[in-house]
Amino acid sequence: MSVQERKERDRAARERLIVATARELAEQQGWDAVTTRRLAERIEYSQPVLYSHFRGKREIIGAVALEGAAEMAAAVRAAACGANGPRTRVTALALAYLDYAERNPAVYDAMFQLDGGLAFAVEDTPEPLKDAFAALLESLGDVAGDGVHPGLFTEVFWASLHGLATLTRAGRLPPAEAERRVDLLVDRLAAI
């Protein structure tokens, strides 16, 4: 391995460490606790080293969001793949989405609530965000109904899931009714 290859490998490892540490700290104490000073202390590098990877907290949030989008896409695809029939597939997708949001609240916030400097729904949207939407579209496009654009249907279904995730987490909806809400959403919105 050349010196340059080793430096690139070490740089990539440091970047992964920064993102993992930010994510862990955010999940434990919230995003307000994630500061470059605290991250530098936890990873045992100086703040200038952090700034050589990320210009600031906003970019770190963006990196966590991209990682989360890839994880969510994988979770949704795995759930949908293991289901038989359109209704079961859409229900499994919805439950996997809500489960991911519940188990990873800080990552979910990085993806959809905080400013990570990422562009959504435009040509230069980062690939992990496009893929997360594609993971939803793959299962939802088939149940959009006659005359309904699959992408538009997916946006509305996703917005509904986001609302359920956000309101449940905020204590506005009782968590015990989550599966009944998903059943209602699938029954009323999807053309199955």
Image (cartoon, rainbow, N blue to C red):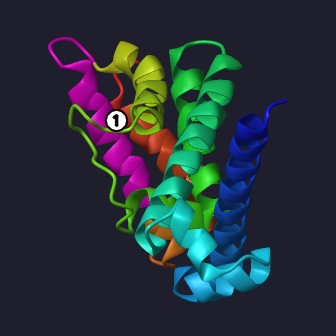
Tell me if mark 1 has few (under 14), some (14-19) or many (20+) residues whose alpha carbon lies within 10 angstroms of its own. few
When the figure is inspected, residue 20 is found, relative to residue 140, above or below; the finding is below
Q: Can residue 141 be seen in this view?
A: yes
On the rendered structure, is 149 left or right of 159?
left
When the figure is inspected, residue 70 is found, relative to residue 168, above or below; the finding is above
Give the image location of residue 55, x and y in percent. 43, 68
Residue 6 belongs to magenta span: no
The C terminus lies in which quarter of the figure?
top left
Which residue occupies the extreme front position in the image? Answer: 3
The kind of secondary structure the magenta stretch mainly shows is helix
Residue at the image position 85 percent from the left and 29 percent from the top: 1
Residue at the image position 35 percent from the left and 49 percent from the top: 160
| Residue that carries the numbered disc 1 in the rendered image | 188
Which residue occupies the extreme left position in the image? Answer: 147
On the rendered structure, is 156 left or right of 134?
left
Please report the bounds of the magenta region as a residue range: 145-164
Residue at the image position 50 percent from the left and 64 percent from the top: 54
Amino acid bearing label 1: Arg
Relative to the observer, which residue lies in front, 55 or 124? 55
Residue at the image position 72 percent from the left and 58 percent from the top: 14
On the rendered structure, is 163 left or right of 3?
left
Relative to the observer, which residue lies in front, 180 or 127? 127
Give the image location of residue 127, x and y in percent. 42, 32
Residue 147 belongs to magenta span: yes
